[in-house]
Image (cartoon, rainbow, N blue to C red):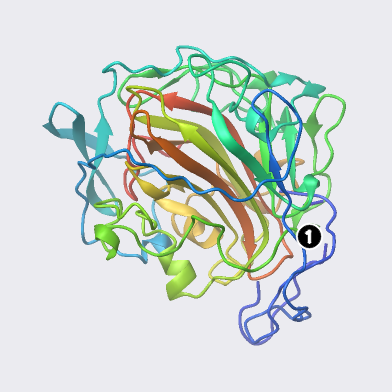
Amino acid sequence: MFDNQKLSVVVAMSCVLSLGVGCSDDKADAGDEVGMTDTGDSTATTTTTTMGESSETNSTTADTTADTTADTTADTTADTTATTTADTTATDTTATTTADTTATDTTATDTTATDTNGTTTTTTTTGGNGCEAPPSYTNCDGTPGQLTNDPWRAIGVNCPGDATNSVQAANATMNSVNANAWRVAAQFGSANGQNPNYAVPNLNGKLWAANPGDWTNPDDEVIPSNTSAAILILSTGVVAAANGQSVVLENNPQDGNGDNGNVDAGGLPAPLTPTRGSNNGLGGTPFVNCDLVNDCSDSLYEWWIVQGYDDPNDKLWMQAHLTVPPGTEGFVFDFAYFSSEWPDWVDTAFNDQFIAWSTSEAYTGNLTFVNGAPLTITSLDGAGAFQYTNNAPQLAQTGFTGNAGTGWFVARGAAVPEEQFQLTFFISDLGDSVLATGVLLDNFRWECAGCIPSEVNSCGIQPQ
């Protein structure tokens, strides 16, 4: 049940998961769906809940801003012919990326990767120089039927312990008016399957479930698991209640799962911005010479500024300040994306999105991509990045049958040892509050060797 179904548009284009409640900021112009009228700015106030390090007690806090002082040098060169319209460039999902080591110094290894879009160079740090990332992590997922209720703990952050055995965060918040717009679960949907990034089976052999295996990065560094039983579901609709075994089964289509009452309009939450941040703020060289304020990937600019797709609705975001362990230069986490906007609303303003944003001195901006595309329906469609579509069995009881989802991927970000940076996970509808989009998150952990992502080489994470 991720209400109100989109109506057909006669003239121009019009626009994870149960029950919707009032409040929308949809525009009533020629680009809107028939039947959508302007109800004025939303009066809903976002509930900001601070998640304690070792307590389930909640309190309201103000937004915080990371002020990092660490200094880093991004040893990265990129293909300057890349354009901000790359979002809509189709990419063969079976494209093979090859890497050649082109330069080595005492701090980083530059690797050049080529695919169907061209070439680029990305920086992969060597790590291992006094890296104090935990060799194993304290598990605080709980067990099916008795999982944690803390969204940050569900992905492995702020478990009991210290920096030697857990990822500790300050000012960890969940910003959502509707507490049912997110859910901690042991399983989403009913499909059997395997997360292809790991060698061991998923929990209970289910596709959309945690995987407790270690991950080996492209530099052959083994990253220990930081999950056992819990995953986190975020939605622009409402997520169905879990059953007694913490399983979420969506038996109603997500295209009937509408406005969840979360805040509409008002743009992106700080510090997120669609302004290009590469080339020292001039843009045009994605991932190179970050200005450390704006989006160094340049990946949001095309939709928000060029196309004017800048009307977010049902906004939900999580934020926390993380302190990087000594000698540690990166972090990773698992994600998957689904949307009921696909296929009817591709290439329209109803371009629902998920953004993971880092303010690290190593790289500031959006860091989640599949096949080089940011996580919007039009970008992913153009890149051939939706692995499961229409009646694929992998979408069974997710509510997205007839729609689309990616597979599981590992996002990889860069960091500066001992800096504090802010991490934000943000999801929203765009253009309306009608059809639901959802994201699964899990398994945040530190990585000794960091990596700055790029549009054609997502740090060695290849399509499955």
Quadrant housing residue 305:
bottom left
The answer to which of 330 and 190 lies nearer the viewer is: 330
User: Residue under circle 1?
Assistant: 261
Image coordinates for residue 54, horizontal then vertical, percent: 68, 23
Q: Is residue 79 above or below residue 145?
A: below
The answer to which of 15 and 205 lies nearer the viewer is: 15
Check disc 1 and report its element: helix, strand or loop.
Answer: loop
Give the side of residue 240 with respect to residue 463, left or right: right
Image coordinates for residue 56, horizontal then vertical, percent: 75, 29
Q: Residue at x 52, y 62 (%)?
A: 378
Give the side of residue 8 with respect to residue 278, left or right: right
- The amino acid sitting under disc 1 is Gly
Residue 409 seen in render = no
Q: Is residue 35 above or below residue 250?
A: below
Give the side of residue 132 with respect to residue 22, left or right: left
Image coordinates for residue 265, horizontal then vertical, percent: 64, 69
Q: Residue at x 39, y 53 (%)?
A: 91
Q: Residue at x 38, y 55 (%)?
A: 293
| Mark 1 nearby-residue class (10 Å; few <14, some 14–19, many ≥20) | many
